[in-house]
Amino acid sequence: MDANEEFKKGLEGIVAGNSKICKVDGENGRLWYRGYTIEDLAQNCSFEEVTYLLLYEKLPNANELKDFSAKLAGQREIPDRVLTLMKTFPKAMNSMECMRTAVSALAEGEPDARFAKMDVHMASALSMTAKFPTIAAYQYRLRNGMELIHPDKSLSHAANFLYMITGKKPTDVETRSIDMDFVLHVEHSFNASTFAVRVTVSTLSDMYSAMTTGLGVLKGPLHGGAAEAVLAMLKEINDVGNVDAYVDKALANHEKIMGIGHRIYKTTDPRAAILKKMAQELSSKKNDMKWFNICDSIEKKMIKEKNLHPNVDFYSSVVYHMLGMPNDMDTAIFAIARISGWSAHALEQYSDNRLIRPVDNYIGPLNLKFVPLAQRQ
Ligand code: COA
């Protein structure tokens, strides 16, 4: 490559592969999973249903959904050795560091992916999908010196997660809210963590390595880490009357407003639109509109100043807060949902694999005169 040849910083706009999983229309703010609109899926489906759709390429019928849900519910508990390991984690480890380490430790010597059949990868995907909420809830309770609440097979994926965190059986509204939030977070084409999962799989590494990669990439504040940063920002602003000054100062200092902006969406992120409605309804039910109103005001200001819109992490922070979720769990909740998309992409990559290995545009020197160690200044 010529040193002056143009490249796209951050791979913006680069097509990196074919996929049948998800379509994002950033110009018009539209999103489909396997051909179904996000609006239909969010309104009508559970996490289990959409996970089945992503993994098996069709919506399940009633029997298939029942079997699939039972299969997930039956493998939520984590091995004792992983729990023992989690008990050694320092309190300072944050939720994503705990999840990344515990998920990596779930592996038990995966078969060589050169010879493994697809059902081995599928089994690993289902096992981790079932266990992610348990790991997230256990690390939260361990870090806060609370008694562990073990998974309850009789509850749905969403309800069981809320139960393991709060210790209370959730209401229908709470369950439906977190379930819808999961559906909105499960998948989003070649985003950074999903692409990283595909790169990992393309080396014919195993599913546990791939999901551990996904967690490490999701954690960053420009990706899923923004979820936690939003509520911290709202608390710093604290009053709707402070929004203009806060945003003006941040923009003057070239700082990012968390939960705003997106590489693909040039208009409203359709997931944010659904989450905004949900945040408003939950806040109104709780008679606590403060955080929603701050968000709404930031949204208006950022559209006016920069024509930048809220992304999926913006109003979800208010949803989690209204559901009583601890703030430092926001990115972990994203991960609990996103493992479905990661798994679907891993399976798609395994099924038609070629090593992903781009090139760089080398801009350093060549043929420098070598100086032996003893003669170096
Ligand atoms: N706050 C303020 N300005 C922002 C911004 C934000 N959240 N997001 C983008 N911008 C501005 C940049 O400062 C830049 O302005 P400039 O051209 O005047 O220098 C321009 O928009 C392009 O930003 P850039 O970071 O190059 O866009 P990107 O496509 O690489 O980044 C994000 C996309 C999501 C990383 C970016 O919007 C961001 O950092 N958002 C906040 C973090 C976040 O919410 N992440 C979750 C994504 S789902």
Image: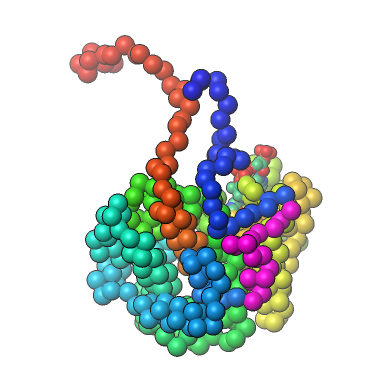
- Residue at 45% in and 36% down: 358
Give the mark count.
Answer: 0
- Residue at 60% in and 75% down: 45
In the rendered image, residue 306, in percent from the top left (x then y), is placed at 74, 46
Nearer the observer, 124 or 156: 124
- Residue at 43% in and 58% down: 347
In the rendered image, residue 154, in percent from the top left (x then y), is placed at 45, 88
Nearer the observer, 212 or 305: 212
- In this image, 78 relative to 320: left or right? left
Nearer the observer, 78 or 261: 78
Residue 184 visible in the current orientation: yes
Q: Compared with residue 225, is residue 319 higher up or lower down, i.e. above or below? A: below
Q: Compared with residue 252, is residue 91 higher up or lower down, i.e. above or below? A: below
- Quadrant position of the C terminus in the picture: top left
Residue with the most extreme right position: 304
Magenta stretch? 28-44
